[in-house]
Amino acid sequence: MKILVTGGAGYIGSHMVKALGEKGNHDIVVYDNLSTGNKDSLLYGRLVTADLSDMQTLDALFRAEKFDAVVHFAAHIVVDESVRNPIKYYRNNFSNALNLIEACTRHHVTEFIFSSTAGVYGIPEKMPVAEDAFLRPINPYGASKLMVEQALRDVSLSSDLRYVALRYFNVAGADPLSRIGQRYKEATHLITVSLRTALGLREQLNIFGTDYDTPDGTCIRDYIHVDDLVNAHLLALDYLLAGNRSRVFNCGYGHGYSVREVAEKVKQVTGVDFKVNETARRIGDPPSLIADCSRIRDELGFQPAYDDLEYIIKTAWQWEKKLRRKE
Ligand code: UDP
């Protein structure tokens, strides 16, 4: 199989490339503009350094290679940045995704896996949230991802394209051998920020909001290890290649942890009692997001292997320490 992985030099994309490479039977082409990704995160595959806004390069690539499937990770992911700079998000996450979808239809590539987000739900009425819940994103990041889902649905109805959209909950952790992990210098995600605080790279961890309607007042998230998430992609790929219909699946574990619980666990794993500061809410944050995972379990046979916050944090901690030694 020849597979195009956009954003394959990024955090989740590089773990996907690793998993595809380890299967041994795939020809992997990575398309990445290296804006946040790194060349040396690629354990396998060939890299095309280009932007998805560059329709000419995309077209030439699709003409030269006959892809069996596309896995689309390349996107901006910082929620509060999307609130401050929505055009950046609509342009890259939506408009550039549309270029890629168009290239697929023009060159008869019919299998497409899309990195979507639990952010498409906004503030769900029911928790855990299932795929058929109302879709009312509360920030441009979630909205830009939902627009891609809608485009995929419409294009799939008017062409041979079939897709799986995977709605990620909170992805964390790293390769257990610490070869790859989150490299983004300006990381904003809770586990990475906490670990970098434990390493002394930040003075303190700010907890954004302690007055939410949750048991300890801080937000609750469903954290999934990146290697489990990648396994969900492999299952989705097999599902599409077997000729199955387009489908949307949640990717999480079905239970969550509060910000305070995560901060405590990071302290325990690292052995560092770093400073925690309670601050105001961050814009665009829903109080609680937990996946109803029954669909992916029942239809794709997804079984998590790393549903353990301590393991998630440990693998990320090993990686962060290695990253510091490298830099
Ligand atoms: N969070 C926090 N301090 C930080 C980073 C995140 O309190 O330095 C909180 C954030 O407000 C949210 C939760 O941790 O409630 C998870 O945020 P993250 O950015 O990791 O992921 P998101 O859920 O926004 O995709």
Image: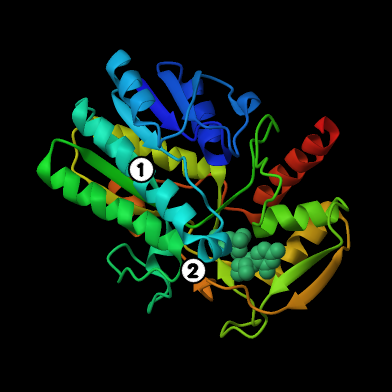
Q: Is residue 231 left or right of residue 103?
A: right
Q: Which badge, 2 or 1, comes first in the chain's sequence?
A: 1
The residues bearing labels 2 and 1 have C-alpha atoms spaced at a distance of 25 Å
Residue 292 location (% of width, % of height): 39, 63
Whether residue 126 is situated above or below residue 33 in the rendered picture: below
Q: Residue 102: image x %, image y %?
A: 25, 36
Say which of marks 2 and 1 sits in front: 1
Q: Is mark 2 within 8 Å of ligand 1?
A: yes
Q: Quadrant of the C terminus?
A: top right
Identify the residue at the far left of this view. Answer: 158
Identify which amino acid the numbered label 2 is placed on. Leu
Query: Is residue 133 visible to the viewer in this orientation of the structure?
Result: yes
Q: Is residue 314 above or below residue 235?
A: below
Q: Are marks 2 and 1 in contact (CB under 8 Å)?
A: no
Question: Does residue 293 appear anywhere in the picture?
Answer: no
| Callout 2 secondary element | strand
Residue drawn at 41 percent across, 49 percent down:
91
**Residue at which label 2 appears:** 289
Who is closer to the viewer here, 299 or 33?
A: 33
Give left or right: position of 261 versus 287: right
Residue 18 located left or right of residue 317: left
Which sits in the foreground, 108 or 240?
Answer: 108
Kindly indicate the quadrant of the structure image that contains residue 107. top left
Q: Amino acid under label 1?
A: Ala
Task: Give the quadrant of the N terminus.
Answer: top left
**268 in relation to 181, above or below:** below
| Residue 71 x %, y % | 38, 35
- Residue 186 percent location from the top left of the image: 69, 50
**Residue 97: image tag:** 1
Which residue corresponds to the image point at 27% horizontal and 65% vertical from the top-left?
132
